[in-house]
Image (cartoon, helix red, strand yellow):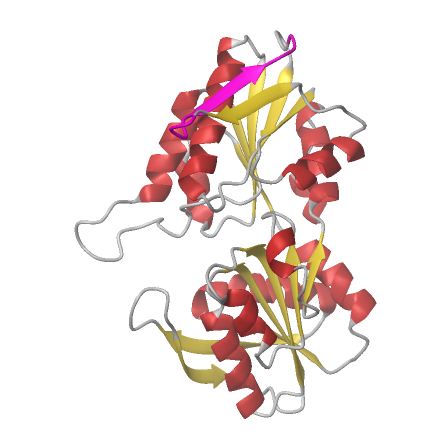
Amino acid sequence: MKILAGTSNLKLCKDIARNLKLKLVNTNITRFPDNEIYVEINENIRGNSIFVVQSTSNPVNDNLMELLICIDALRRSSAKNITAVIPYFGYARQDRKVVPRTAISAKLVSNLITDAGANRILSVDLHAGQIQGFFDIPVDNLFATPIFARHIKKNIKTNNLICIAPDVGGVERARALSRRINVGIAIIDKRRPTPGKSEVMNIVGNVKHKICVIVDDIIDSGGTIVNAAKALKDKGAKEIYVYITHAVLSGSAVDKIKESQIKKLIITDTIDNSKKIKISKKIEVISFAPMISEAIKRISNSTSVSSLFK
């Protein structure tokens, strides 16, 4: 078993390798002057099981292309098995046709990764569960819920908690977290007048004098979460914590969070945001490396990955 690190999130790759007591595969990944990606593997990996770790975060297309080229290089180097470890799966929000004459880009990306030569996928909190069915190879989807539950129990000492689903699609995720910390849930009813913008219409559930924990898989521009926090405050919520797996944080998202009603935003390191958030005291990062490392170990040993969440 060996770990090959893409360039999108080197810190996470190093943390995973350290947890597994492995050295990263000696690889040269560079760009030509015209920005073409060049990948060279500088050691023998013939007959090895290789886990290539690469988040397809911003710049999404560059990181996706790098992943595909890494997989192709491994296949042509006679690796025994290639597992694409994609902590953040870009294009996951384009999983269906919302309006006529649009692409289902998540399916296209899954085809590209499979055709490049991947034998297995390991990802984290896929935006839509059906994406697992887009692949014709095994997919293991890890969940942040256990990590979030442990963090809440350790850091938020109160019996007055309530889990908040930021939209109807997030109810299952909120319910899973609420079961682990034994609290109720509320749902925010919102609509999207245009892509990237949301309006809170109503809150289903009583949040007055409650400490609210919003849980979601992605925060992008921050508008949805900021609007949700304001609506909760207007309904009498006491404090608002937000737990997000993938912090895309595009544009002025960090500034929006800083000026919002949110007391603390807790994110994981599936996307490298070290430069964006280093000056923000409202944002805390918890590592997903231990869980990814354990999943890699179990895949390598052919033991159960799903039992991680029982």
Instruction: Tell which residue pokes out farthest to the left in this image.
Output: 101
- Look at the picture and state if 261 lies above or below 255: below
Task: Answer left or right for 221 relative to 1.
Answer: left
Point out the stretch of residues depicted in magenta: 33-44
Question: Toward the viewer: 244 or 172?
Answer: 244
Q: Magenta span has 37?
A: yes
- Look at the picture and state if 120 lies above or below 152: above
Image position, residue 173 (x, y; %): 56, 61
Task: Answer left or right for 94 relative to 212.
Answer: left
Residue drawn at x 49%, y 43% is 89
Residue drawn at x 77%, y 25% is 22
Question: Toward the viewer: 19 or 28?
Answer: 28
Res 182 seen here:
yes
Question: Toward the viewer: 69 or 37?
Answer: 37
Q: Quadrant of residue 268?
A: bottom right
Image position, residue 13 (x, y; %): 67, 35
- Look at the picture and state if 215 lies above or below 186: above
Question: Toward the viewer: 148 or 229?
Answer: 229
Res 118 seen here:
no
Q: Quadrant of residue 19?
A: top right
Q: Magenta span has 22?
A: no
Q: Quadrant of residue 156?
A: bottom right
Q: Quadrant of the N terminus?
A: top right
- Look at the picture and state if 130 lies above or below 34: below
Residue drawn at x 48%, y 60% is 220
